[in-house]
């Protein structure tokens, strides 16, 4: 009975399904971040038709660690990010210039409660806060020098702040001065 659900998040017991925007009648998406096809009858060879039952799509995980599903209607296949399908169905159309952000920094957690529309810098702030920022995870500069307190300085970039390597800067300056002295 209910006792087995003690400590579980009650909202998980009731999964809400809504049509995938643009694929109404063919696919549905849930507030828990699952996507399913709706059973349909398709014409096959000759005059015969066959029924394809609906199923939850497992999809694929991209290199950037986002879940993607293939949606197809009449032979036209589209690869769609699950977080985008969830946000569109449950939050609404994405406002111009905003991105979809995962509140906990986990790109595979596509529950509607974990998604929001925000600016690009809000999205980057997230990745920094959650330690999922690929740039911040790098411990060394491209030349192999350690990004430690003594060797790192920061510069403004269009999306926030970037890290620079003091050692590389020193070597570039030395080279520049040598070149200037040669004249």
Image (cartoon, rainbow, N blue to C red):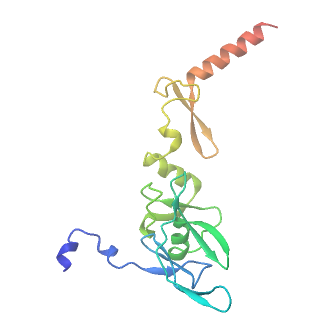
- Residue at 46 percent across and 65 percent down: it is 110
> Splitting the image into 4 quarters, where does residue 68 fall?
bottom right
Q: Is residue 131 above or below residue 99?
A: above
* Location of residue 49 in the rendering, given as x and y in whole percent from the top left corner: 60, 90
Q: Quadrant of residue 99?
A: bottom right
For image coordinates 51% across by 29% down, the residue present is 140
Q: How many marks?
A: 0
Q: Quadrant of the C terminus?
A: top right
Residue sitting farthest toward the bottom: 47
Rendering quarter of residue 2:
bottom left
Q: Residue furthest top?
A: 182
The spot of residue 131 in percent (x, y) is 44, 45
Residue 165 placed where, x, y %? 56, 26
Q: Left or right: 27 with respect to 1?
A: right
| Residue at the image position 46 percent from the left and 47 percent from the top | 132
Image vertical order of residue 115 relative to residue 41, above or below = above
Q: Position of residue 151 (x, y in %)?
A: 51, 24
Front-most of residues 79 and 175: 79
For the N terminus, give its image quadrant.
Answer: bottom left
């Amino acid at each position: 009975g209910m006792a087995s659900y003690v400590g579980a998040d009650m909202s998980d017991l009731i999964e809400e399904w809504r049509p995938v925007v643009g694929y109404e009648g063919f696919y549905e998406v849930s507030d828990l971040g699952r996507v399913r096809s709706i059973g349909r009858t398709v014409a096959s060879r000759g005059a015969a038709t066959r029924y394809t039952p609906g199923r939850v799509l497992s999809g694929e995980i991209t290199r950037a660690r986002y879940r993607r599903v293939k949606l197809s209607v009449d032979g036209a296949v589209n690869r769609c990010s699950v977080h985008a399908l969830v946000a569109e169905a449950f939050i609404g159309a994405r406002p111009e210039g905003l991105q979809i952000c995962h509140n906990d920094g986990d790109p595979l957690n596509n529950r509607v409660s974990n998604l929001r529309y925000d600016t690009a810098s809000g999205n980057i702030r997230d990745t920094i806060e959650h330690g999922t920022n690929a740039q911040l995870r790098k411990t060394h500069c491209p030349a192999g020098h350690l990004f430690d307190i003594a060797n790192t300085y920061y510069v403004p970039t269009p999306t926030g702040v970037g890290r620079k390597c003091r050692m590389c800067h020193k070597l570039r300056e030395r080279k520049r001065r040598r070149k200037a002295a040669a004249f």
